[in-house]
Amino acid sequence: MTMDTIPLFHNKNIILGVCGGIAAYKIAELASKLTQAGALVDVILTESATKFVGPVTFAAVSGRSALTDADLWRHDQHVPHVQLGEKADLLIIAPATANTLAKLAHGQADNLLSVTALAARGPIILVPAMDGGMWSNAATQANVAILRERGFHILGPALGRMASGLIGEGRMVEPAEMLGYARVVLGAKGQLAKRKIVVSAGGTQEAIDPVRFIGNRSSGKQGFAIAQAAIDRGAAVTLIVGAATLPTPYGAKRIDVETAQQMCEAVLAACRDADALIMAAAVADFQAAQLAAHKIKKTQDTVDFAIQLTRTPDILQAVKDQKEAIGKPPITIGFAAETQNLIENATAKLTRKGLDLIVANDVAAADAGFAVDTNRVTFIGAGGGVEPLALMSKAQVAERVLDRLIKLLG
Ligand code: PMT
C-alpha cells in the first residue's frame, strides 16, 4: 500500500454508474480518488452519459476499462453485468438522473447500468442531479420514496445553481462528499460498529484580552485522522475540536470549542455514553488569571509586561474521576507531546491520568508532531509494554491507534 491508500477501500470492488447529466464530468475525479485510495473501480456509462463524457476519460483514471451498453452484448464474457453486480462491494450512481431513478424504482432493466444494479448484492448509493422542477416532481419523489424504502442510500441533491441557471434543489453533491459518504456506508459493519468513540483534536485557545490568546501549533490533523479512521471502522464518532480549520469527516458529530474549560465540559458530556475517548487535542495547561475586558495597551514606557497565569482543568484527570464514578468511558487513550525524556514523561502521564494507553509523541522532530502530515509515535500500555512505531502518515498512525483500541475493547 502507498501512503495514499485507505485500508477501507483496499481491493474493494466499486462500480461507478454514470448517467447523462452535465455533472457527469465530475465523476472522473471520484473515480480517480477511489482508485488512488486502493479500490478497483469499474465505471458503467449510460448511453446519454457518453454524450457528456467518454469512457476513455474513466479508463485513464481508473486503469480499468469503462463499460457502455455495447458491453452488455459482448460474446467473450458470460453475463458480465451479473458478475459485475454480484462481486461489487459498493455501487455508486452519480449523477443519478430522474430517468435512472425511475428505472431502478420499477425494476426496469434495459441498459447495462440498470441490469447491473438489479444484480447487485452490496449497498447502492444514488446521487441525484437534475433540474429542481424534475426533482420536486411528484413522480420523482414517489420513486425516491420507493428506493429509500428498499434500502438504497440517497445522497443529496444539494441546493444551489443548476445547469439551467436556476437556483434550487437538484445540484449534485461534490465528489469529496460522495467519498466521505461512501466511507460511512462501506465501514458500517466494521470492527467498531455500534461503538461510540469520542475524539478530541486541535489546540485550545485561552483568551488574554478581546484580541489575544494563548494557543499552540496543533492543526488537528492527527485527531481528525483518528476520527475518520474510526468512522471507516463503523464507529459513531463525536469529534471535539479546538482551533482547527479542517473539513469534518463525513458522519462525525463535530463540537467546536475554544478553551480548555469548554473542551473539558464537552468531553465529559460526550463520554457519558461512550465506549472510548482518544485525547489527541493539545490542551493549554495555563490560562490568564484575569481576562482583560479591553485590549491591553502598551504605553511609551512599557518595557516589561507580565501576565499572571493559572492552571486550566486537566481534562483527562476529570475523565478519570468520571470513569471511577459512572464507569464511562471504559477506555481512555491519551497523547503525550514531549521534547525530552519521551518515555519517562509519557509513562508518568499514563499513570497519573489513569490511561489505558498513551501515544508518546516526540514533537521536537521536524517530521513529527504539530502541523505536519507525518508522525513518529511510541505506544505505552497501562500493563507495561513499549512499542515504538516508524515514521508514518498521521492516517497510518490513526489506524494503529485503532488497532490497539479494538484490542482494549476486547
Ligand atoms: O494537531 P496536529 O498538528 O496533528 O498535532 C498532533 C499533536 C502533536 C497535537 C498530537 O499528536 C498530540 O501529541 N497531542 C497531545 C498534546 C498535548 O497536549 O500533550 P500533553 O503532553 O501536554 O498532554 C498529555 C495528555 O493530556 C494529552 O492527551 C492532552 O490532550 C491531555 N491534557 C492536557 C492538558 C490538559 N489540561 N488536559 C488534558 O487532558
Image (cartoon, grey):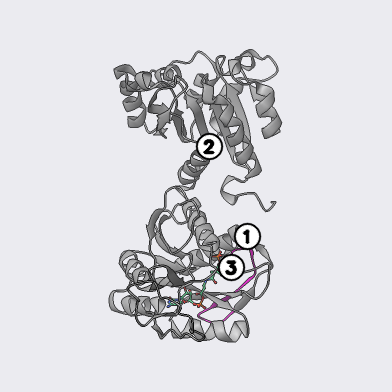
Quarter where residue 153 is shown:
top left
Number of other residues with Cα within 10 Å of mark 1, as a class: few under 14, some 14 to 19, many 20 or more: some
In the image, residue 372 lies in the stretch drawn in magenta? yes
Q: CA distance from mark 2 to mark 1?
A: 23 Å
Lower position in the chain sequence, tag 2 or tag 1: 2
* Residue 317 seen: yes
Quarter where residue 35 is shown:
top right
Query: Does mark 3's beta carbon lie closer than 8 Å to ligand 1?
Result: yes
In the image, residue 157 lies in the stretch drawn in magenta? no
Task: Work out whether 239 lies above or below 118.
Answer: below
**Residue pointed to by mark 2:** 175
Secondary structure of residue under mark 2: helix
Task: Work out whether 91 lies above or below 334.
Answer: above
The residue located at (34%, 69%) in the rendering is 262
Boundaries of the magenta span: 370-385
Q: CA distance from mark 3 to mark 2?
A: 29 Å
Number of other residues with Cα within 10 Å of mark 2, as a class: few under 14, some 14 to 19, many 20 or more: some
Lower position in the chain sequence, tag 3 or tag 2: 2
**Residue pointed to by mark 3:** 370
CB contact under 8 Å: marks 3 and 1:
no
Residue type at tag 3: Phe
Secondary structure of residue under mark 3: loop
The residue located at (35%, 78%) in the rendering is 318
176 or 76, which lies in front? 176
Number of other residues with Cα within 10 Å of mark 3, as a class: few under 14, some 14 to 19, many 20 or more: many
**Residue pointed to by mark 1:** 373
